[in-house]
Each structure stands twice: as structure tokens, then as C-alpha cells.
Image: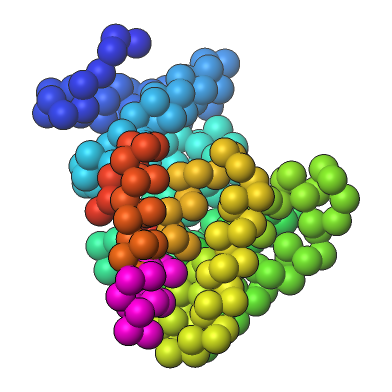
Amino acid sequence: MAKLDLEITEDRVNTLSWLRTLEIKCSRQDSESDRSFDFAYQIWEKVSEQMWFLGYWNDYFNCANIVLKSAKAVGNIAIKAQLLGELGWVCMEWEEFAKAEQYFLESLQTYESMDDRRKQCRLLRYLGVLSHRQNKPDLALKYYRLAWDLVAANSLGELANETWAFSTAELPNVLGELYLDLQDFPASYRELNLSLETYRYLINRYRYYQADPILNLGRWHFLQGDLEKAEKYYQECLLLCEEISRPINRLAHC
């Protein structure tokens, strides 16, 4: 496949066209279907992150929806579950909360049918973030605790700890952010510090996500009136984002 410049409208249009052509081939369910799907998924993996961070969310959604249909046609339930989660996140960003919940729940149910507990944990976290954004803190807390239950039940042993490392670090961040909005400052501080300490323990594996608890700790100190410490965390967050080329306006928030 030729190199794409997704900031050029024609290249985004061509990407959609290729995916639609491959979807038709997948729907035939013949000897070429699996190979066509593999190619479609390779295209998606190549373009999805760039489309997201460049802000072409309509194109992102349309491409994801086409690949989802292709995954259903060839019976690839793992990719189906992945795409459902990604489509749900777009709908959440658009504040189409009912659609987002529908996508997230279908993704969660698919992962449950696969007994993929790590991915179940991810979707429970997504549902928690969705509930938080809808100002439903009790429901958000319920989903986060269900996610923690999965982490606690499955993160024993060195190999398991590696598999569950991200959830172990990220769940305290989203919990800390929720408690911060509820003005439970002691609980928020405890969770945010735990998140940051865990991310730092993981060294360079998840530096991209480390910015979130740092930013939230800045917010915590700002709300406490400690402007000096707030500025310290904000500066640390900014420097990290510049170092890893993470757009500051794309930091996760509820």
C-alpha cells in the first residue's frame, strides 16, 4: 500500500474506498475473505491512530464501522470486540452517550464470551469513564470496582503482573479523578499518587499515560489552593508531553 498522508482529503477518501471494497470481498465468505479481512485490518491499524490524533473523527468512525462489518462477516470476534470499543469511545467523545454505552456493552459481552478478562477490565473502565462523563458517580464507581475485582483476581504471579500492569496503574488514576470531582480529596490524593507511583515503577512502558495522573495531581493541588505545587505538576506534565510528542490537548479527561 502506498504511503498515506491523512491530512490530504483524497487519501482519507481513498482509504474509505479501499475498506469498502475489502468489505464486499469479506461478505462473499469465500476463500479470499480471510485474506481480504487481514488486509482491511492492516489498513485500519496503519491509519486509525493518526486519524484519531489529527482529529478526523468522522473518517475514523466510518473506517472503524466498515472494518467492524468485515470482522462480523468473517467471524473474527476478537477484532469485532475491539472495534466496538473503539466506536464507543468516539461516540462518548461526541457525547452520544446512549450509543457509546451500547457499543461498550456489546464489546464487554463479546469479551465475556471469549473469557478475555483483561479486555473485560478495559471495557469496565470505559463504562466507568462514560458514567463519570454523564455525572453518574455511583455508577462510575461501580464499574471501576468491578474492574478492580478482575485485576485483584488475575494479577498474581510475575507473568500475570506483566499482563495486568496497565490496569494496575490506570484504574487508580480514573478513580482519583472521580474522587476529585466528588471533592473527596484524601481518597483522590491516595489514588492519584498510587497511579503515578505505579506508572513510574513500570519505567518507560507506559510513559504516554503517565501524564494523566501528573495532570490530575496538578488539579488536586490547584483545588487545595497550593498553586506552587500545582504549577510544578503542570510543568512536569507539559515537559513529559513535549518529550514524548503527546498533544497536550489530547490528555484523557472525564
Query: Magenta segment, which residues?
Result: 216-229
Residue 240 locus on image (x, y percent): 39, 45
Whether 203 is drawn above or below 226: the answer is: above
Query: Does residue 185 appear in this view?
Result: yes
Residue 238 locus on image (x, y percent): 31, 51
- Tell me how the rendering is colored: rainbow
Residue at the right extreme of this rendering: 157
User: Who's the residue at 70% across and 52% down the image?
Assistant: 164
In which image quadrant can residue 13 be found? top left
User: Who's the residue at 64% across and 57% down the image?
Assistant: 198
Q: Quadrant of the C terminus?
A: bottom left
Whether 195 is drawn above or below 249: the answer is: below
Whether 77 is drawn above or below 236: the answer is: above
Residue 212 locus on image (x, y percent): 43, 59
**Foreground residue, 30 or 116?**
116
User: Who's the residue at 77% across and 50% down the image?
Assistant: 161
Residue at the top extreme of this rendering: 2
Residue at the left extreme of this rendering: 9
Residue 144 locus on image (x, y percent): 59, 73
The overriding secondary structure of the stretch rendered in magenta is helix
In which image quadrant can residue 220 be found? bottom left
In this rendering, position of residue 221 left or right of residue 186: left
In which image quadrant can residue 223 be found? bottom left
Is 231 in the magenta? Answer: no
Query: Does residue 97 appear in this view?
Result: no
